[in-house]
Amino acid sequence: MTDRDSEAERSPDDPGGTAQPSFKRYTDDRPDATVTEWLRDRSEPNWSAAIDNRFVRQLAADELDDEVFRRYLVQDYAFVGTLVGAFGHAVGTAPTMTARSRLVEFLSVLTDEEDDYFERSFHALSVPEEDVRDPPRTPTTRALEDLLERAGREGGYAETLAVLVPAEWIYLEWARAVADADPSRFYLAEWIDLHANPEFESFVTWLRSELDRHGETVSPRRRRRLDRLFFRTVELEVAFFEEAFEERPIDGARREQRGAGGW
């Protein structure tokens, strides 16, 4: 069996791989194509849904309900803790000091600049301290956390990148698409600004280049693993946006603690 044949690819809608080309086949007509471009195209239509969805459109139009954004932001902050751990794992497994340095720089942004944004936004949105400290995770948040942890535990540097790249790249793309929007609420406007700026774009471009470089050299079997991780991350990012619109029940004890202003 040739490498080309052994890379007959999976897709949840196309388990036989007939409609989804392997990377080798993908580059037949696109000699300059990269691994991340291939992975992005293979994740459709979820990729487009992650970039353009009702959450992003309402946020940009300043029409997003505070309750929806509060639910979303609480879950995002819960996920950030696992994300920081994943970047820390990437630091430990990165093959060069240059890569480690770049990852450490981004970790500083996550734990400093973004953390300040979360603190101010939670205060403005009257988020209870218990939901900042230890919120109940939604099914999608738990699935994202499990995916990140499993990628690092069961794989290596490339597998971790296969989850980190789409997670960060999606945020760059949706934010760039609405960069000219100017919501009146600071927590909406700054959420766009945090992800639509030259520094973040530079980091995502570099992160993609890391996955491109490693993804080109791995075996077809391992590349299929990267594909599955990338695909699942994009799928869950779509669900993450949508889940914010779902009102979730609160048990009696916590309802009393929160009072009328809780969510």
Image: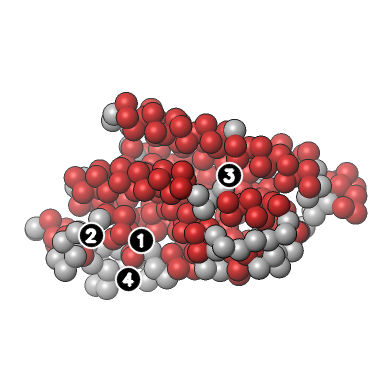
Q: Position of residue 249 (x, y in %)?
A: 77, 57
Q: Is residue 55 visible?
A: no
Mark 4 or 1, closer to the camera? 1
* Disc 2 packing (10 Å; few <14; some 14–19; many ≥20): some
Q: Nearer the viewer, mark 3 or mark 2?
A: 2
Q: Earlier in the sequence, mark 3 or mark 2?
A: 2
Determine which residue is flagged by label 2. Answer: 33
**Badge 1, how many Cα within 10 Å: few under 14, some, many 20+?**
many
Kind of residue at disc 2? Ala
Measure how far apart labels 3 and 4 are at the Cα level.
30 Å
Q: Is residue 131 left or right of residue 20?
A: right
Q: Which residue is mark 4?
A: 14
Tell me the element at label 1.
Answer: helix
Q: Dots 3 and 4: beta carbons under 8 Å? A: no
Q: Choose the circle earlier in sequence order: 2 or 4.
A: 4
Residue, disc 1:
40
Q: Helix or strand or loop: what does disc 4 sit on?
A: loop
The residue nearer to you, when weighing 131 against 225, is 131
The amino acid type of the residue labelled 1 equals Arg
Q: Earlier in the sequence, mark 1 or mark 3?
A: 1
Disc with the residue nearer the chain's start (4 vs 1): 4
Q: Residue at x 38, y 52 (%)?
A: 229
Residue 238 % position (x, y): 52, 62
Q: Element under label 2? A: loop
Q: In what quadrant of the picture does the N terminus appear?
A: bottom left
Per the rendering, the mark at residue 79 is: 3
Between disc 2 and disc 1, the foreground one is: 2
